[in-house]
Amino acid sequence: MKFNVLVLFAMLFAFSGQSFAASEGREGDWETRIVTGDLKATAGCKDKAKAEKQTIPGSYRFRKYTKIMCQTIAYGWGRDKVLDNGKLACDACEGEYEGKEKYRCYMENVKVQCKIVKRGF
């Protein structure tokens, strides 16, 4: 019994090294894709300056929705870099807002490079 346990641990130790990992010699191999699309518009109707500030590149919403664009490909895909920030577009909201115009802004034609670790042996 002790011999079987000892052999089992020896085999686990021998075959658990990095040399037998599925990613041997592939450290840094990435598969990339380029995705183009429009980002989601701001929630609700806001003043134009505030809506633009929440939408422009570098904002939290921009980073969040470019990441989501990559995740729509499949599980495990992440944003590598933004190749083209696209163009800011604002649509006026309909309705009464105490005499002020309110807008919903979004980025259109954003081009993002997405990446995932290559699969397989």
Image (cartoon, rainbow, N blue to C red):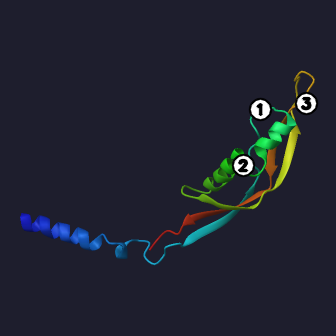
Q: Nearer the viewer, residue 2 or 36?
A: 2
- The residue carrying mark 2 is 62
Looking at the image, which residue is at 86% across and 32% down?
102
- The residue carrying mark 3 is 101
- The residue carrying mark 1 is 44
x, y percentage for residue 32? 63, 67
Q: Nearer the viewer, residue 54 or 88?
A: 54
**Between discs 1 and 2, the one toward the N terminus:** 1
x, y percentage for residue 30? 57, 70
- CB-based contact (under 8 Å), mark 1 and mark 2: no
- CB-based contact (under 8 Å), mark 2 and mark 3: no
Q: CA distance from mark 2 to mark 3?
A: 23 Å
Looking at the image, which residue is at 44% across and 72% down?
23
Q: CA distance from mark 1 to mark 2?
A: 16 Å
Question: Tag 1: residue type?
Answer: Gly
Q: Which mark is residue 87?
A: none
Question: Tag 3: residue type?
Answer: Glu
x, y percentage for residue 49? 85, 38
Badge 2: few (under 14), some or many (20 or more) residues near its Cα, within 10 Å?
A: many
Identify the secondary structure beneath mark 3: loop
Identify the secondary structure beneath mark 2: helix
Badge 3: few (under 14), some or many (20 or more) residues near its Cα, within 10 Å?
A: some
